[in-house]
Image: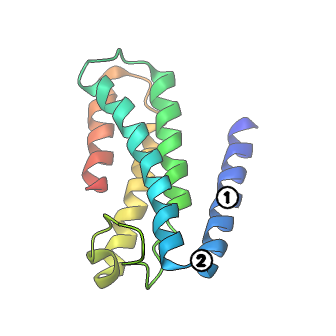
Amino acid sequence: MKTKTRVLAAAAMALLVTLSAAAMTATEAIEQRKKQMEGVRDGILVLSAIAKKEQPFDAGVVKANAEKIATHLDNAKGLFPEGSETGDAETAAKPEIWTDRENFDRIFASSHQAAVALQSVTEESAFPPALGKLGNTCK
């Protein structure tokens, strides 16, 4: 039941972000997506520390950070509207997002799927390949 509630809450948040993205300026979109991508980065940093053996493997920590990453990716997907390649805020978003949108959307969806799959990792031996899959899609 908790998982279903979380999924519904994430879907509602993604819808709100998508609807509000349509009405925001390029600078607002840049600032919002930066916040979401910083959340992704924060989750990746924790998981990277586990991969580097700087932190012990803990399936609960892996799940929580993979959920965090998936949620932030979900929230960010609507924050790349046409015209937000530039604005009054700096952006690290690659130009290919807008010049090859189909590929970007495919890769973005793959990243989200990899984050969702990582949530179910309970064995340390399954962690490196699952994290690698996420890392490869996030490049």
**Which residue is rendered at x = 27% and y = 18% of the image?**
54
Residue 120 in picture, x, y percent from top left: 48, 34
Using the rendered view, name the quadrant where residue 16 is placed: bottom right
Mark 1 or 2, which is nearer the eye? Answer: 2
Amino acid tagged 2: Met
**Which residue is rendered at x = 43% and y = 30% of the image?**
121
Does the rendering let one see residue 50?
Answer: yes
**Which residue is rendered at x = 32% and y = 24% of the image?**
50
For label 1, count other residues whose C-alpha is less than 10 Å away and answer few (under 14), some (14-19) or many (20+): some
User: What residue is shown with label 2?
Assistant: 24
Please identify the quadrant where the N terminus is shown.
top right
Please identify the quadrant where the C terminus is shown.
bottom left
74 or 41: which is nearer to us? 41
Residue 67, numbered circle: none
Does the rendering let one see residue 116?
Answer: no
Residue 13, numbered circle: 1
Residue 24 in picture, x, y percent from top left: 59, 77
Residue 72 in picture, x, y percent from top left: 51, 51
